[in-house]
Structures are given as structure tokens and as C-alpha cells.
Image: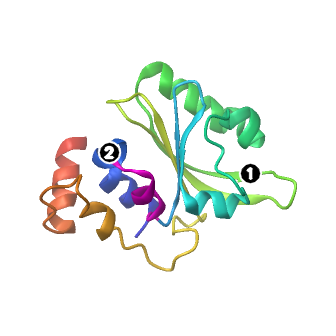
Amino acid sequence: MPLDTTTRMLAPFLNRLNDEELDSIPYGVIQLDPEGFVVSYNRAEAENAGHALRPIGQHFFREVAPSANAPEFHGRFQRGVATGRLDETFTFTYHCDLMPRRVQVRLYLSPQTRSVWLFVAKPDGTPLDWPTADLSPVLCSKHVQSFTGFAALHATVDALLA
């Protein structure tokens, strides 16, 4: 399942997912407050970024991923927070000590919490570690009371985003 589809499906539920549910998502998922501090950081992103500990409370653009402190990444984040609208997908290369990491990033601003969700995938939009993404456990969690299948969910999400 491509990153854009996954983000659209999860967007209405992101703010209600607990750490265990976030960890079941095979993409890197990071939640930032409007200032850029890490609120949530799932297991897939921690493993792929080489973090032994999740950097909760650290500033993403200064401490966690300084190479993301660039106009094409941090600038998008800042403009989205300032305008209250952000839903963009782009390819980015993290330059880190070990080796550069080219990824696809989706930035999504939650209108309810004003936090920004970062989804991180392979450059082609596929999950970081898993060959297929089965999001059924997340979408069938206690937060989604009446999940009746992906077709119904797509229609609901499309209606919400229209």
C-alpha cells in the first residue's frame, strides 16, 4: 500500500492511536508539536534511523534530524503550521553520520491538535521494512468503531478530505 493511501486512511484516527498502535504501522511515523518537538516516534522509524531510544521531547530539526533543517523540509513544516494547512509528499535525503538515507516524506497537519505527522517511507512510497502493509489491526482498533473494509474507509476519508 503506497504512503499517500496509508496517510489518507489513517489521518482521521492519528490523534487517537496509542504507542502500540503506532508501532504496528510499517512506515516511520513521527508526531511533532507546532514548534518542532517530537511528541511520538514509532518503532519503524527508530529502527531505520538507528535510534536506540526514541527522541521524545527533542527538537526534530535541531537535535534529531539536523539535515532536515532545510527549506525543502523545515520550510514546508513552518509554512504549514503558520497557515494551518499541510498535506505534502516529497522525496528527501537525510545526511547522517553513517550513510545518507533517501526517503519519501509525507507531512500532514492535524487540524484537531495542530500537530504535524511525518510519515517516512522508501523513495517509492513502500513501507520501510515490510513487503506489504496490513493496517487492519490499526484500523480495527478500539478507536475505529465500525470498520467495514477498505472500500468503505476510502469513501469516508475521501468525503472528509473533499
Q: Residue at x 32, y 30 (%)?
A: 112
Q: Amino acid at mark 1?
A: Tyr
Q: Is residue 70 visible?
A: no
Which quadrant of the structure image shows residue 58? top right
Instruction: Describe residue 129's horizontal placement relative to residue 95 as left or right.
Output: left
Crowding around mark 1 (Cα neighbors within 10 Å: few <14, some 14 to 19, many 20+) is some
Q: Which mark is residue 82?
A: none
14 over 124 or under it: above or below: above
Q: Amino acid at mark 2?
A: Arg
Which circle's residue, 1 or 2, is located before the other in the chain? 2
Q: Residue at x 52, y 64 (%)?
A: 125
- In front: 157, or 116? 116
In the rendered image, which residue does mark 2 sit on? 16
Where residue 32 sits in the image (x, y, percent)? 54, 36
Question: What's the magenta region?
Answer: 17-25
Crowding around mark 2 (Cα neighbors within 10 Å: few <14, some 14 to 19, many 20+) is few
In the rendered image, which residue does mark 1 sit on? 94
Instruction: Describe residue 2's horizontal placement relative to residue 100 as left or right.
Output: left
Q: Residue at x 48, y 61 (%)?
A: 23
Instruction: Describe residue 56's horizontal placement relative to residue 8 as left or right.
Output: right
Where residue 93 sits in the image (x, y, percent)? 72, 53
Which quadrant of the structure image shows residue 102? bottom right
32 over 4 or under it: above or below: above
Helix, strand or loop for disc 1 = strand
Helix, strand or loop for disc 2 = helix
Residue 82 on the magenta segment? no
Instruction: Describe residue 2's horizontal placement relative to residue 112 as left or right.
Output: right
Residue 21 on the magenta segment? yes
Q: Is residue 25 visible?
A: yes
Where residue 26 sits in the image (x, y, percent)? 49, 67
In which quadrant of the rendered image does the N terminus lie? bottom left
How far is disc 1 from disc 2 in space, using C-alphas?
29 Å
